Amino acid sequence: MVIGTATASVALCDTVSVGVRWSLGDSAVKRLVRDRGWPRVLSLTSQRIPMDVAQLSVVNGDASQPQSMLSAISNEMVRIYKQQFGRGPTKTRTNWAGPDGLVVTLEDTLTPAEHRLRDLGEHQRLRDLRTLFQYADVGLFCEPVERLTGRKVRAFLSGIDTRADVATETFLLHPEGYDGPSRISAREEVGGDVR
C-alpha cells in the first residue's frame, strides 16, 4: 500500500538531512523515521518513489535486507501452507504495517475439498477449519517471523475470505530489544488440549 510519495533516495549516514521536500511534510517524515527506527539516512535526491519503497529502503543500515527479509517471510508462509494444507498459494506478498506489524497476504490457497465446501455455501465451516489448523500450531507460523526479523511476535492473527480465496497472516512484533516472552510461548487451548 502506498501511503504517499517522497522525493527521496536513501543512503547511509549518521543524521537525517534537513530541508528535504517530502509530499507528506517534514513532521510526518520525522515520525516515520523515528517510528521505523531507521538508523541512518544520508542524501535525498529528486527521484520520486512510493513512500512504502522509501520505508523499506533502509533497515539496520542494509538497503538490501528488508526486501529479502520480506520475500523470505513470504517464502516461509508458502512452505507452511504447503505443509499444513497440501498446497501453497499462487500469490504471496509480505508488507510492513507500521513499525511493528507485518501482514502476509496469500491468494488462491484453497484445496479442491475446500473449494467444494465453498461451492456448498459452507463458508463459516471452512473458516473454522482453516483457523483451527492455524491456531493449533502458532509456533509454526511465528518462528520464521521471529528468526527473520530478529524480533519476538507479540500477537498473531489469521484470517481468510473464503469467497475471494484470500488469506492473511498478521504478526504484531515487540520492539527491538524486548527480552520477555513471545506469542510462541503463550499457551493456547485447542480442542480441550493446551498447546
Image (tube, grey):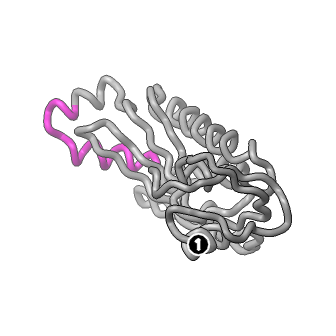
Residue 172 visible at all: no
Which SS class for mark 1? helix
Report the residue at 26% width, 28% height from top.
115
Q: Position of residue 124 (x, y in %)?
A: 22, 48
- Residue occupying the far top of the picture: 112
112, above or below 5, in the image: above
Q: Which residue is mark 1?
A: 26
- Residue occupying the far left of the picture: 121
Q: Is 125 colored magenta in this rendering? A: yes
Question: Where does the magenta region start and end?
Answer: 117-135
Q: Position of residue 150 (x, y in %)?
A: 74, 57
In front: 125, or 71? Answer: 71
108, above or below 53, in the image: above
Magenta-colored segment: predominant secondary structure = helix
Q: Amino acid under label 1? A: Asp
Report the residue at 64% width, 53% height from top.
8
Q: Position of residue 146 (x, y in %)?
A: 68, 55
